Structures are given as C-alpha cells and as structure tokens.
Amino acid sequence: MNPANPANAASSNDPMGSGHWPENPAFTLSRERGDLLVLTHIYTATLVLGIGALFGVLQGFSRANWIVMPDWFDYYRMLTAHGVLMALVFTTFFITGLLTYATYRSIPRVRSTRLNWTGYCIMLFGTAMTALTILSGNATVLYTFYAPLKASPFFYFGATLLVAGTWFVAADIIANVVWFKKHNSKVLIPLPAFVSVCTMIMWIIATLGVTAEMLILIPWSLGWTSGVDVSLTRMLFWYFGHPLVYFWIMGAYVIWYLVVPTAFGGSVFSDALTRLAFISLLLLSTPVGLHHEYLDPGIASGWKFLHTVLTFGVVIPSFMTAFAIFATFEIAARKNGVTGFWNIVRWLPWRDPAFAGPALGMILFIFGGFGGIVNNSYSMDVLVHNTMWIVGHFHITVGGPVALTFVGAAYRLVPSLARRQLFAPKLALWSVYMWFVGMAVMSFSMHWAGLLGAPRRTSDVSYFGAAGAATWHGQMIGAALGGTLIAIAVLFFVIVATGTYFTNKRTEDNPALAFAPVDAAAGGTPPVLDKLGRWAALAVVLAILAYVGPVSEQLSAHAYLAPGMRTW
Amino acid sequence: MHIHRYEKIWLTFGMCILAMFIAVLSIAAIGEGFVPPSNVQTIDPTKVASTPPFDHPGLRKVGDHAYEAYYVAHIFSFDPATITIPAGSRVTFYVTSTDVEHGFSIPATGVNTMVTPGWVSSVAHTFRDPGTFLLVCNEFCGIAHQTMAAKVVVR
C-alpha cells in the first residue's frame, strides 16, 4: 500500500496540498517573510549575473583582439571574477532561493526564517570578501584556484564562507522536511520539497571536498604550512567541481519538472520517476570527478576509467528527464485536442518568457549533452581538453540551459514574490530569444575553435602570428558577436527584474508561482523512493568507493609539497 | 510504480547506448592502447636542473624514427623552445614543471597533457607530415601565460 501523496490528494487548483492546512494569520505573515527572503536571494543572483556578463563580453572582445585590457584590470583578473561570479555565486544564490521557495510553498507552516537569513548573510559576506579580493588583483587564480598559485587568504576565506552559508540554507530546508515527516509520517514528502532536499543533500556531500581543500589551502596561504600536495588539492577540487555542475542541473530540473508545465496547464508526468531522477543524480554526482583529470599525471589510468563508466551513468536520469518533459508537453496538448508533432510545437506558449526561456534552454542542452559525451570519452578527451571546446561546452550547458531556465523562472518568481506585474514583458521575451541566439553563435564558435586546438584560459590566442594560431581568429570573432547578444539579453533581464520591483505598484491579483500538480494517472510512488536518508548514505558510500583508491595512491606517493607562488 | 511501455523502450535504448559507449572505449583502451596520458612518476621540482635527463632538456634519438623529447616547463616558456624532427618520427614527450601547473598541447595532434609540479607527464605522437607545429601551454600559469609557446618543426 502506497502512502498518499499530498499533491494527489489536493484539488487540482491547489496543487501544493495547502488545502490540508487551516488559514492561519501567522502563516500568512511567515509567507510574507519567506517571500522577502527568497526575493533577496533572487535579486542577489540577478545583480551578480549582470556584473558577470559585463566581464564576459569584455573577455570576448579581448580574445577577438578588439580591445586589450589595461594593466590595472587585466584579462586574467577579469576572467577569475567572471568564473567565480557566474559559476559559484550567481547559480548558488538562485538555487538557494529557488529551493527555499519550493520547500516553503510545499510545506505550509508557521516558521522562522532566521536560519535561512543567517545563511544568506554569510553567503553574501563571503561573496563580497572573495569578489573584492579578486577585483583588487590579489586572487588572479581563476575559479579553479589550482595550487601552487597562491591567492590572498581572504579569497579562500570568502569562498569558504560562501559555501558555509549554503549549509545554513540547506539546514533550513532539511529542518522543514524533517518537521513535515514528523507530523505526516504516512505521507510522502511533497514533491517540490523532496527535490529541494535531495539537491541539498547532494550539495552537502559535494562541498565536503572543497571544504577539505580549503582546510589545506588556508593555513598554507597564511604561511603556517610551507607547501601543499598539488595533485591532492586538484582531486579534492574536482570531487566538488563536477557535482557543482549537477547542482546547477538539478536546480534547472526543479523548474523543468515542476514549473514549466504550469505555463500550459500541464502536470508532472510522474511523481515516482521525478523522485527517481533526482535520486539518480544524488548518487551519480560525486563519484565521477576524475573525468576532469583525464590528462593529469600521477593518477593511474584505471581510476580514470572507473570514473568514465560512472559518469556515463548520468545517461539514465537524462533520458528519464527528456522523456518526462516531452511527455508532459504531449499529454497537455492532447488534453486540449492538439495532436501531431508540429501542431504540439506550435501550441506551446512560445510568447511566454517563463516558458520560452527554459524551453530554449532544453534545445541547447541537447547539444550540451552531445559535447559532454565527447568530453567524458576517456581517450577522446585528449583532443578537446583545455581547448575552447570546453568553454563552448560549459556555456551551452550552464550558460544556456541552466541560466535561461533561471531567467525564465525569475520572470514568474519575481512578480510572484514582489506582488507586482512583470515590468516590460516584451523586453523579457526579447531577452530569452536573444540569449538563445547569442549562446548558439558563441558556443558553436567556441566548440569549433576548440576542435582546431585553440587553448582556453588565454587572453590572446594569436601567439605572435604563429601559423597554427591564425586559424582561430574567425571563431573568436564569432564568439565575441554571440557574447555581445548574450550581454544585451542579460541587460534586458536585469532591467525587467529590477523594474518589476521599482516601477510597478504592488498588486494582490498576482498569484504565487505554483508548482505543477502530479498527474494522478501515473500511479503510486513506492515508499522507498521517499527514504532520502538511505539514498544519501548510498551516495556517500559510492563517493568513498570511487575516491578511496586514487586518494590513497596520491597520499602514498608522497608527492612534493609545493610552496605558494604569485605569478601575476 | 507504473512505467509507460514507451518509456521502458526509451530507457532500454539509453542503456544500450551506454553499454556501447563503454564497450567502444574499453576496446580502444585495451586493444589499441588509447589511454589518456597517465604517467605516474614523481620528481623534485626544485632539483629538476640537476635530475637527469631533465638537466639537459631536448631531443634524444632512441631508434629508427623514434625519439624522446625532454621538456622543462616554467613561467613563461618551454625548454627547449624548438625541436626539429624528420617526418614519420614517433616522439615520446616527457615534461615536468619547476613552478606552477602548466599545460602541454600541440593543437591538431593528440599531444595534450597537464604538467603538475612534482610529476613527470608523458605523451607520445607520430608526426607523419612535414610542417611547423605550435606547442602551447593551455593551463593558466600567470600574467604572461598567453606568450608561453614553443615550436616543433617536422621536416
């Protein structure tokens, strides 16, 4: 016998199951507080995205040889800022906000937001410390901060605080789910809260790696230790670095599974399969990091192959998600009497930026998946490693699908949280389409340059006119043009998001962003899929199994302990 | 838990693709030796200048059309800056760093490896056609990283 699903039990116009809960003035008040909290997370992400995009487009111009960055704000300093702000700050603030929202909405209760606000403040303080250290030129180590490049201790402190702050948010989300389970032991965790807590458990397991790395780097940067094992710090970084990628993807999946269907009156394809997809990502996120180190000396090829196999496991949740999303489209279209592939495509709400953003992102993600297969293909990685191909790949994954999904969702979330009408909806629509076109052009150019061997992380690829380098210039111009379109799209997004708050008046007829109801026809969910404790334990076991060999080999090699260097 | 028949077919298709990818890579790795550069050999970066063969970086002929090339990578250059080999030569590169992390890549060939201080990286390639190949550092190593390059001349 399956436990009842609150999303099923509730009426269709009340998908959150809040019908179980009596109207309570204290709850209304806490919802207001919760809205302000989430809005602050989302606006922080918005602002960071704007700054990051400016740095990004200047990088494109530099590589196209249109400009040369001045010594007081050199290319690599800007590249570090762009990477840290986009990969670590923008995504993290958006996801902590989104998951908080999903948890609060699906578990209605009188609650304190203090723990979450504490987390937010620590994240913000850490971000400010890291960003100022980078901008002052004392941490030009790129977002991977590979030792023995040695940044100012403030860089490492700030980044650690950013991570530590997210743990407070995670603790708040977990505490809400634990509260729910305590009061509803026979009921499944509501799906939006389930996917949130699943993502956060994955994040906690992953961030233990980078925290361990920081425990090595901080004393070293303070001069308390004389050297660090470079390979070990790289391994710890990538133990975290790949799950970081899945953290973004899981954030986007939350929206694809639970928010996108609301744009056309659809429902979640299957409660059970959604849970299974998130559990698969929880299990398969960490034990795969060595695929970023295929070309590293000092790691035996057998360990690398083990991680190749485990990485390919992501095929399963990817295929499940692709099926579920397209099934959601088709089922909703058929309910409206629309059949046939092109009719369904035309029927979808392409003029709604909250749909178009994620949907265009899905198109880009197909190509991101193709490229990812190449990157993970062990020996084939030699052809693309550290070339522009990789830059093209992560822009067409995080910079396209994930960011476009977040932007699209923000066009629902911000009006809902600020209780205002969306400002300049046409501009919002322009932003997602321009972004899509810009990203397609930029990423295609980058992939192409990479296949021709153009290195990444390099301010100028002309190499004094060397013969091999001449073939890369055209692609760099393509990338700069695409990047310009994206930067304008980001500017439009920032205008719409902030304009919504500052120019429009508060209105109560703006409904809260709802999550899609679960399709009742899909059948029950096995209770085992709701037991997150065991899945988390299994994820830890898998991570240990995948890393115990390479880490112990690393330690027993007694590698040289490198002193820090400042080469910028 | 009900899984739609189409989804079962779709996931089976996914699993088959997965098995095929792994099979192809396994056959290439075991049968043909296509393995990413994974040399496990330590070195003291402070003593590179006195550790043979890196005390004399450069090209060694080890057989008919077979060479070994020993490179020292340091900010912001490679030593040797140029090597010249006849077309058809198989060169095994050995590279180590005396300071930070570097990359060692000859675009448009299969030569690509990270260079980590404390380790010796190794990668081999057969240069069939004559030409001048650019050798670049493809990992950020410092402010003049974009100038860190060398040449491989194939005659």
Image: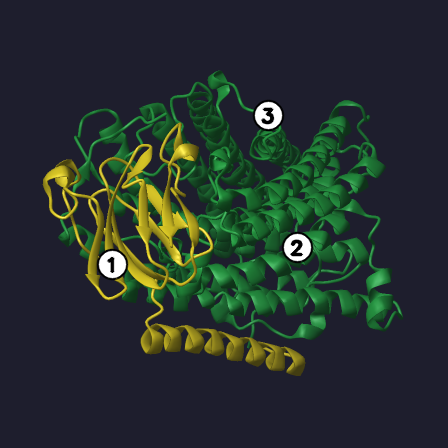
Chain colours: A green, B yellow
Q: Which mark is residue A67?
A: 3
Q: Does residue A503 appear to the left or right of B3 in the view shown?
A: right
Q: In the image as oriented, which residue stretches furthest toward the top?
A: A72
Cα–Cα span, label 3 and label 2: 29 Å
Q: Mark 2 points at which residue?
A: A364
Instruction: Name which quarter of the figure residue B80 lies in.
Output: top left
Q: Are marks 3 and 1 in contact (CB under 8 Å)?
A: no
Which residue corresponds to the image point at 85% horizontal and 73% vertical from the top-left?
A340
- Tell me the subunit letter for badge 1: B
Secondary structure under tag 3 reads loop
Residue B20 to residue A452: above or below: below
Secondary structure under tag 1 reads strand
- For the residue pair A170 and B78, the one nearer the viewer reads as B78
Q: Residue B67 carries which label?
A: 1
* Residue type (three-letter) at the residue carrying disc 1: Tyr
Instruction: Name which quarter of the figure residue A364 lies in.
Output: bottom right
- Tell me the subunit letter for badge 3: A
Q: Choose mark 3 or mark 2, whichever is in front.
A: 3
- Can residue A264 be seen? yes
Secondary structure under tag 2 reads helix
Instruction: Name which quarter of the figure residue A535 lies in.
Output: bottom left
Cα–Cα span, label 2 and label 1: 45 Å
Marks 2/1 same chain? no
Dot 3: within a 10 Å radius of its alpha carbon, few (fewer than 14), some, or many (20 or more) residues? few
In the rendered image, the quadrant that contains the N terminus of chain A is bottom right
- For the residue pair B101 and A524, the one nearer the viewer reads as B101
Dot 2: within a 10 Å radius of its alpha carbon, few (fewer than 14), some, or many (20 or more) residues? many
Q: Are marks 3 and 2 in contact (CB under 8 Å)?
A: no
- Can residue A187 be seen? no
Which residue corresponds to the image point at 54% horizontal and 65% vertical from the top-left?
A277
